[in-house]
Image (spheres, grey):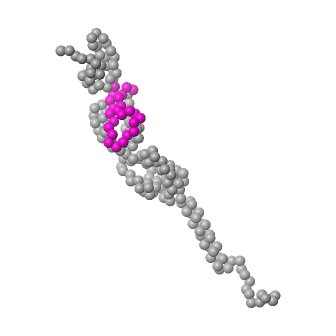
């Protein structure tokens, strides 16, 4: 032995203190990797309004719950609620609204998720005639409580004062048709 080294133990690279630090470092790195894998960014689109959401949830339902979105029976969600999440995925939520549809004079209440009149007519599978009258217009936005009026138009022949005209109309009676045409009946 050399002088001055007597009584010292040789140093080991992996002393108990260093082992503890190494274990903690590996644990933190593992936890960080797990956290990074569990965290996902998804695009949540509610009634056409998108926003990015960071989540640790595992299903679409988890995201909606975390964002405080309470679904009702007529609402639509794509993909389905139990679908697993993936980073970068898109979740579309269409919240239903109750409106009144007046179809050729018959009024009924319906639940729809369409944002415009055209989307609502498509959703309720209404086969539109080419000359149908729709109020408000097809491009109008639809809000809860709105009224959409749909009247089929049809062709009629009118003979007045020796003149014959073919008219496409949605008038629901002869009096309204004559008023529209400016025809006044005499006694």
Residue placed farthest to the top in the image?
162
Residue placed farthest to the right in the image?
2
Name the chief secondary structure element in magenta: loop
| Number of on-image labels | 0
In the image, 183 versus 86, the foreground residue is 183
Is residue 172 something one can see in this rendering? Answer: yes
144 within the magenta span? yes
Left or right side of 42 for 157: left
State which quarter of the image contains the N terminus: bottom right
**Relative to residue 57, is residue 164 depicted above or below?**
above
In the image, 52 versus 17, the foreground residue is 52
**Relative to residue 129, is residue 60 depicted above or below?**
below
Residue 5, quarter of picture: bottom right
- Residue at image position (37%, 26%) is 131
Residue 106 is situated, as x and y percent measured from the top left of the image, at 27, 34
- Residue at image position (31%, 17%) is 157
- Residue at image position (58%, 64%) is 32
Give the magenta range: 130-153
Residue 166, quarter of picture: top left
Residue 94 is situated, as x and y percent measured from the top left of the image, at 41, 46
Residue 51 is situated, as x and y percent measured from the top left of the image, at 49, 50
- Residue at image position (39%, 43%) is 113
Is residue 123 something one can see in this rendering? Answer: no
**Relative to residue 55, is residue 149 depicted above or below?**
above
**Relative to residue 92, is residue 151 depicted above or below?**
above
Left or right side of 76 for 102: left
């Amino acid at each position: 032995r050399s002088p001055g080294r007597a009584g010292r133990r040789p140093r080991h690279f992996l002393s108990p203190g260093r082992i503890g630090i190494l274990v903690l470092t590996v644990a933190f790195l593992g936890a960080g990797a797990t956290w990074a894998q569990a965290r996902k960014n998804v695009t949540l689109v509610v009634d056409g309004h998108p926003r990015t959401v960071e989540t640790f949830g595992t299903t679409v339902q988890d995201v909606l719950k975390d964002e405080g979105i309470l679904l009702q029976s007529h609402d639509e969600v794509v993909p389905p609620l139990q679908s697993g999440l993936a980073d970068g995925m898109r979740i579309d939520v269409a919240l239903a609204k109750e409106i009144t549809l007046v179809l050729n004079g018959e009024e009924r209440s319906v639940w729809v998720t369409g944002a415009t009149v055209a989307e609502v007519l498509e959703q309720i599978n209404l086969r539109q005639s080419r000359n149908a009258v729709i109020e408000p217009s097809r491009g109008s936005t639809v809000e809860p409580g709105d009224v959409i009026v749909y009247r089929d138009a049809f062709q009629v022949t009118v003979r007045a004062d020796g003149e014959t005209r073919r008219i496409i109309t949605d008038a629901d009676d002869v009096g309204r048709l004559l008023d529209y045409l400016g025809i006044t009946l005499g006694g």
